[in-house]
């Protein structure tokens, strides 16, 4: 792997020159070593020599998650004995796909996270509490661990322990940083307040959040982020990562988008017809990871909805940024003329004290539009609470789902039905997905 120092502070033209070279190498490597891309290119009568750099990017075919699921091991570009680690996607949409990494890919992963943590100001002298799993084929845990070690920080690998154990360790070790999903930090804050503890007692200075976004499209803190920042202060850094691309993005201290690492990924945003969109326009995120060895990817359609920013950041970096993830492409809902994403519903529910958990279920109604059942886990089944919740939803998202109040334990079973590794907050029962 080619290690580039501070490439994101080079001029945009210099960055593009490096990316041109890396894209040409990526395409040639994929064609020569991956059976999937060899067959794909030959079918299209496309030769690697036709690719001259980023200007040729739109000539290249898209790759979908379904492609990886269906032809999983055809993507492998090394012998199986050269594979150092196997991870998998979460399987929230279809069968989990297995992703193979070589030793060089693991180094690349560490390099990616070392850069991301530098944006959050992590380094020597920091102790980071990892409240995410490092097992169960989960790539993020090993990525954060290796990146922090490379950054010179100390790491406490705690994983998904119960909240009392987490709080006890944080109080004893006083880590300066923590990596967690936002819902964990909300839970931690509530338990801390219940125990009469203060933020100063914990010692946290940096919170790196994975999974759900804590920003709105205008980069202001959303409802979820506010729940965390109201307790811990403005010390949060939002991130975005994707297993298939072995890549992540991270905010800098300016909180004006998630920075890419230009020597490790190319970023596109496309419309529903696959056409590239200009900066600022909302569409599907497409990634071409660079310098991947085990399973290279070309123009991978992530299914995540966001926008691109190419203007220089106030922090001085010229790396392309993406906005917050606004939803999943296939999760788009059309309800009686209103288009929305499940995240819009979640943002209404977050922070309501009586709500413990929830699941959003959608199915195709008799009028061929989407109908929504919102199952809310709460110990309060008072009629006034239900009416208030419906009024709040109508005011914020302009539609009123069918709301059912259930026991939180029953919702928990629904969320992890079938042994899912990730909570199935959105359950899609539609027989037709809107594109």
Image (cartoon, rainbow, N blue to C red):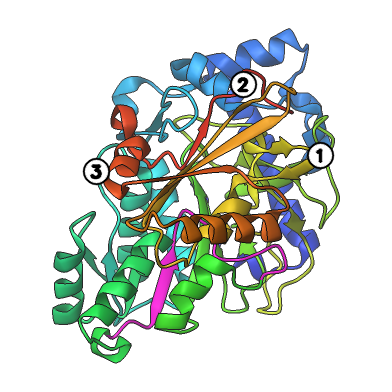
Residue 39: percent from left, percent from top: 63, 10
* N-term-proximal mark, 2 vs 1: 2
Residue 337: mark: 1
Residue 266 sits above or below residue 26 on the image: below
For mark 2, give the secondary structure.
Answer: helix
**Image quadrant where residue 14 sits:** bottom right
Q: Marks 3 and 2: in contact by CB < 8 Å?
A: no
Considering depth in this image, is 239 or 411 the residue closer to the camera? 411
Q: Which is more toward the observer, 356 or 69?
A: 356
Span highlighted in magenta in the image: 203-219
Q: Which mark is residue 130?
A: none
Please report contact status of discs 2 and 1: CB closer than 8 Å, yes or no: no
Mark 3 closeness class: few <14, some 14–19, many ≥20 residues within 10 Å: few
Instruction: Name the quadrant containing residue 221.
Output: bottom right
Q: Secondary structure at mark 3?
A: loop
Q: CA distance from mark 2 to mark 3?
A: 32 Å
Q: Majority secondary structure of the magenta segment?
A: loop
Relative side of 252 to 337, left or right: left
Residue at the spot of label 2: 31
Look at the image and tell me whether residue 120 can be seen.
no
Question: Could you say which disc has been placed on residue 135 in the image?
Answer: 3
Residue under the image location 21 percent in, 64 percent down:
163
**Can you tell which of label 2 and label 3 is closer to the viewer?**
3
- Which callout, 3 or 1, points at the residue further toward the start of the chain? 3
Please indicate whether residue 52 sits to the left or right of residue 162 in the image. right
Mark 3 or mark 2, which is nearer the start of the sequence?
Answer: 2
Give the residue displayed 33% in from the left and 31% down from the top: 417
Give how far apart the Cα atoms at labels 3 and 1 are.
Answer: 44 Å
33 relative to 291, above or below: above
Q: Residues within 10 Å of mark 2 (few under 14, many from 20)?
A: many
Residue at the far front: name it: 383
């Amino acid at each position: 792997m080619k290690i580039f120092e501070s490439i994101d502070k080079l001029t945009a033209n210099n960055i593009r020159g490096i990316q041109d070279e890396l894209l040409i190498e990526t395409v040639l490597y994929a064609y020569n070593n991956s059976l999937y891309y060899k067959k794909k290119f030959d079918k299209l009568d496309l030769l690697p020599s036709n690719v001259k750099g980023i200007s040729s990017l739109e000539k290249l075919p898209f790759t979908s998650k379904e492609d990886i699921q269906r032809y999983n091991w055809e993507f492998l570009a090394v012998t199986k004995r050269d594979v150092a680690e196997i991870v998998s996607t979460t399987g929230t949409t279809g069968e989990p796909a297995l992703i193979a990494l070589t030793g060089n890919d693991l180094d690349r992963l560490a390099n990616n996270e070392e850069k991301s943590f530098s944006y959050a100001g992590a380094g020597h002298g920091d102790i980071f509490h990892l409240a995410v799993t490092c097992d169960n084929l989960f790539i993020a845990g090993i990525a954060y661990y290796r990146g922090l070690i490379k950054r010179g920080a100390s790491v406490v690998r705690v994983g998904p322990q119960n909240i009392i154990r987490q709080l006890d360790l944080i109080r004893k070790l006083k880590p300066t940083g923590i990596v967690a999903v936002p819902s964990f930090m909300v839970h931690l804050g509530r338990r801390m307040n219940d125990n009469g503890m203060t933020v100063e007692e914990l010692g946290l200075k940096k919170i790196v959040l994975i999974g759900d976004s804590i920003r709105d499209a205008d980069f202001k803190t959303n409802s979820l982020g506010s729940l965390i920042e109201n307790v811990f202060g403005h010390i949060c850094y939002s991130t975005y990562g994707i297993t298939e691309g072995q890549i992540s993005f991270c905010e800098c201290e300016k909180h004006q988008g998630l920075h890419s690492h230009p020597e490790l990924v190319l970023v596109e945003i496309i419309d529903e017809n696959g056409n590239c969109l200009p900066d600022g326009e909302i569409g599907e995120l497409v990634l071409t990871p660079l310098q991947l060895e085990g399973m290279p990817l070309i123009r991978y359609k992530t299914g995540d909805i966001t926008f691109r920013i190419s203007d220089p950041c106030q922090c001085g970096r010229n790396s392309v940024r993406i906005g917050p993830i606004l939803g999943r492409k296939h999760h788009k809902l059309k309800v009686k003329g209103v288009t929305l994403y499940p995240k819009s519903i979640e943002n209404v529910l977050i922070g309501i004290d009586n709500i413990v958990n929830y699941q959003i279920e959608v199915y195709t109604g008799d009028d061929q539009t989407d109908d929504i059942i919102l199952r809310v886990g709460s110990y309060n089944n008072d009629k006034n609470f239900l009416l208030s919740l419906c009024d709040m939803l109508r005011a914020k998202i302009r539609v009123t789902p069918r709301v059912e109040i259930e026991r939180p334990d029953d919702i928990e079973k629904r969320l992890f039905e079938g042994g899912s590794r990730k909570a199935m907050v959105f359950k899609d029962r539609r027989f037709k997905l809107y594109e």
